[in-house]
Amino acid sequence: MTQTKIKPDQYLHSTILINSDHPDIINKASELTQESDTPEEKARKLFYFIRDHIRYVFNADREKDQYSASSILKKGRGFCTQKSILFCALARACNIPAGIHFYDIDDYTLPQNFVDLLRTKTLYRHGIVSLYLDGRWHKYDATLGIKLVNRNNLIPVEFFPDRDCLMHEKTQSGEKHIEYVKDYGLVADVTYEEIRSWFKNFYGHLMK
């Protein structure tokens, strides 16, 4: 099923992790978008909040209660999928259809100690967000904040309402950065059990 055929109303419901009906999520969504009139402008505000104000961390929490959007908002940090869970919840709280789109990506800028730890430069099941705006689905990767990007000579992902906004193939100096190598598609929900099973499958040596 292509993204253009996906029914957007399936991507508005609150779930266990994407708990868009939680009071903290509703209040934060309202606070961030109170001066925005259109879904596109609301989405822009949410994108930059997630990108720059929810700190990206490389390690993943082990506890189930750390994966709900409301918990991630409270902590103010998370890895890619956690940031995307929160992004989805805030968007749904604004009545913007949102889902999580998973990819395997190759990160050519990973420090060697991380490559050694993971035993690969591939980041499996990298979670980003798809939003339904003006009758079309577009992908948004808000993983890396502006300070982290600038510190590492990368190119920031900026928000545009009418196109996919993904991490760039090259760094500011023209070296290879990101390659999206496998597309798992868009889902309306994700569970803690799924996330943990992926970590066990791809990075089982880190969970012993």
Image (cartoon, rainbow, N blue to C red):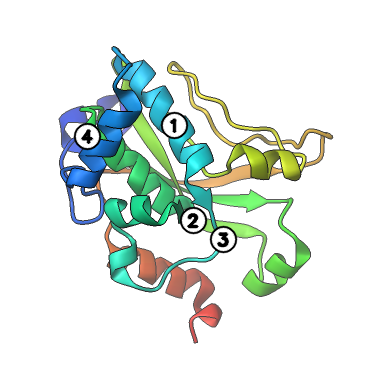
Identify the secondary structure beneath mark 2.
loop
Instruction: Kindly indicate whether the residue at mark 1 contacts the one at mark 2 (C-beta within 8 angstroms).
Output: no
Q: Which mark is residue 58?
A: 3
Q: What whole-number distance in Å separates the C-alpha atoms at marks 2 and 4?
A: 21 Å
Q: Quadrant of the N terminus?
A: top left
Instruction: Tell me the residue at 18%/47% (across/down).
Output: 22
Instruction: Inspect the image, locate mark 4, and give the three-letter code of the amino acid beneath it.
Output: Ala
Amino acid type assigned to the residue bearing label 1 in the image:
Phe
- Judge from the rendering whether residue 104 lies leftward or rightward of residue 35; answer left or right: right
Contact (CB < 8 A) between labels 2 and 3? yes
Task: Decide: few, some or many residues near mark 2? Use Cα within 10 Å; few <14, some 14-19, many ≥20.
Answer: many
Neighbor class of circle 1 (other Cα within 10 Å; few <14, some 14-19, many 20+) is many
Front position in the image: 207 or 17: 17
- Which quarter of the picture shows residue 50? top left
The residue where tag 4 is placed is: 93
Q: Which of the two discs, 2 and 4, labels the residue nearer the N terminus?
A: 2
Residue at point 75%, 60% (across, down): 111
Q: Are marks 4 and 1 in contact (CB under 8 Å)?
A: no
Q: CA distance from mark 4 to mark 1?
A: 14 Å
The answer to whether one can see residue 137 in this image is: no
Quadrant assignment, res 201: bottom left
Pick whichever of labels 4 and 1 is earlier in the sequence. Answer: 1
Residue linked to disc 1: 47
**Image position, residue 25 (x, y; %):** 25, 42
